[in-house]
Amino acid sequence: MLYNFRDVLNMRLHLTQNAIMDYVMNQLHFEDLLLCLKNTYFLQDESFSQHLCEKLFKWVMKCSSLGEFADWPILNKILTRSTAIPSLSNFPFLESASVNFVSISEEYLSKKNKFLRFFQFQFEIDWPLNVIIHKACITQYINIHSRILELEFLCWLLGKIWRLHFIDARSEVLQQSPQYRKVILYRFNMHQFVRVLRSCIHQDLGGPLWQFLLKSLNTKELSIDALEDIHLKYLEKALERCFLTQDTHHLHEILELLFRQVNTFCDAALAASWEMNPDTNYFESSNFPLLSDCYKRYTKCRDRFYEFIWKILSKMITRKKFKPTWDEHYKLYLETVLESGKGYS
């Protein structure tokens, strides 16, 4: 009589896999762990994101140079204290969170405007969750987090320009200055673009994309491989929404240039001094040529950004060079970004 080792082995493997899946889905509460990642990396926990932004951004503005910002011990305290928010204390990821810093020269920072890449959250993920979410996944989450935090920072900076001039005792007199009115208009248009893009990303990550993940997790008879594939698809779509995939690298490069111009504009606007010109009897600033130049460069980047999105949509509509990852939800997302930005272009 022959003994069928293969059937016995397959049966034991099946029982083991079922036990692992029960542990991951039920005892570990896999959906809750993913919700933790979503809230942390996508800054969708309002208490956490507001506390982090207030501490980090206000401290940045106290620095006289980018090199001074690279004071790792101080920055480490800000970030580690920011993660100790009561509303996030029940998230297991934050219990093992640490902040690492990358040593970058001030010259590189000034050239590339990469100061938000200084730090990165790192988490220790225990077995068996690390079978599904790998270190490479965490690296991608870090890239998403950096992009969203960059948008938050630019919104904060552009808002600071308005608040600074609003409380200026000369605000009523300044408003009569043609130069001043142009600068405020430039600021408004930039602010609207950044806010619209930030809002589109947040709404899609927290809405349709999150629902896609939950719906996929409700599939019957999930295996470890299937669960890993579901998470990778979700992560790929999240990267796509932030324009961080290989297929969207042109949009990513355009946004990098655009954000650099916005950041330079903010630095110049916050440092601008307004003095009365006796020849024109209006307040003028020596920084106005730089501010105007930044805005011109910004508008070129913005127009290129929308033009490229339109080209992508045209290809998707005509089914030419259609990419499998460019699903109907992504098409709707791009249309929302395009339509939302039309009123401010």
Image (cartoon, rainbow, N blue to C red):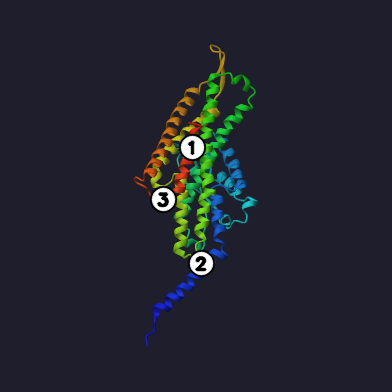
Q: Which of 240 and 318 lies nearest the eye of the viewer?
A: 318
Residue 70 can be seen in this image: no
Task: Find numbered disc 1 in the image and state the secondary structure of the residue it sits on.
Answer: helix
Mark 3 → mark 1, Cα distance in angstroms = 22 Å
Q: Residues within 10 Å of mark 3 (few under 14, many from 20)?
A: few
* Residue topped by disc 1: 339
Between 238 and 115, the one lying in front of the other is: 238
Which residue has dot 2 on it? 21
Please determine whether, in this image, residue 5 is positioned above or below residue 174: below
| Distance between the alpha carbons at the discs numbered 2 and 3 | 27 Å
- The image quadrant of residue 27 is bottom right
Left or right: residue 85 versus residue 330 is right
Q: Nearer the viewer, mark 3 or mark 1?
A: 1
Amino acid type assigned to the residue bearing label 2 in the image: Met
Residue 86 drawn at (x, y percent): 65, 51
> Disc 3 vs disc 1: Cβ atoms closer than 8 Å?
no
Q: Secondary structure at mark 2?
A: helix
Residue drawn where x is 55% and y is 12% of the image: 278
Counting from the top left corner in percent of width and height, residue 269 is at 53, 28
Of mark 3 and mark 1, the one earlier in the sequence is 3
Residue 223 screen position, x and y as percent = 46, 65
Image location of residue 130, percent across then percent down: 48, 61
Q: Nearer the viewer, residue 2 or 246?
A: 2
